[in-house]
Image: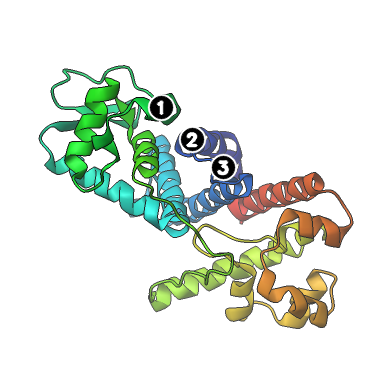
Amino acid sequence: MASVIVKVALPLIRTNLARFVRGRNGLSPDDVEDIAATVQMRLVTKLRATAGSEDEAIQNFDNYVAALTSNVFNDLMRRTYPARAQLKSRIRYLFRTEPRLHTWSVGGRTVCGLKEWPEPLTAATADSVDFDKLPKEVFSGADSSAAVVRLFASIRMSLPLDDLVNVLSRAWNVSDHVPLDAAPVTTATVSPATAFETRQFLRALWREIVQLRPMHRKALLLNLRSPSTPNVVALFILTGIVGVDDLAATLDMTPEALAAIWKELPLDDLRISSLLGTTRQQVINLRRSARERLIRRMAVR
């Protein structure tokens, strides 16, 4: 399983991620790494489930990895950029209900344009759209259908869906301002069986974390997060997997020192580098190495 994850799945994940994140300047390298790590962890869980049930078998591995990557990416986008996610849903609705608009599937991507076009014209990107030359009707969000139709009539090029979202978010002044102290997103109530499986997974994960070298586990734990859980370290405490004193000892800290930074977790790389007495790039390398080892180890459990 470890060989499948590292040699087959990881290249597929990175290929799909490159397509999903293209043109999204708001995503940090940490966001991308978090998505990739979360996809790999979920894939490990799925592959372990397939070993005990034919019903869980993956019919098409490439498609499954692509769909899983898309789901994790979209989870992050909905949580981090709710206004953009709402705009994207609004645009999808327009293309389902407005007869003058049409979408095509080109190379696995949704491409948008006018229904009157027999096929999508050469696809443009958001960066290629000259806003100074767009008709004023495009900038009015009051009549969304008319604005989008006028946009395509003006540029005479199709746009991938995400690029269209970028163009319209700028034209209609749609933006997300996420507060730094935003509260973690709560999850829906889960079944006892799911809760048990999650706890077992966290317990196994913690056993592997404490086996990491000191610098690796510090770089990992001080920035441990996922697209659905901003502070993953808190889960180990809340589920009783580890106590505060043991967590502090794992980080080579006193409980008092851990308490002083608890509300700030996960820390950014500059802060971690200061605590560890190393460089920001070394922190990034340590964390990446730790994640890769964890994924390999969890895959062979």
Residue 112: quarter of image: top left
**Residue type highlighted by circle 1:** Thr
Residue at 45% across, 28% down: 127
The single residue placed furthest to the right in the displayed view is 277
Name the residue that disc number 1 marks: 125
Q: Could you tell me if residue 212 is visible in this image?
A: no
Q: Position of residue 211 (x, y in %)?
A: 77, 61
Q: How many marks?
A: 3
Tell me the tag on residue 183: none
Tell me the tag on residue 5: 3
Name the residue that disc number 2 marks: 23
Rounded to the nearest whole Å, what is the CA distance between mark 2 and mark 3? 27 Å
Q: On screen, 293 above or below 157?
A: below
**Element under disc 2:** loop
Q: How is the image coloured?
A: rainbow
Residue at 38% across, 50% down: 174
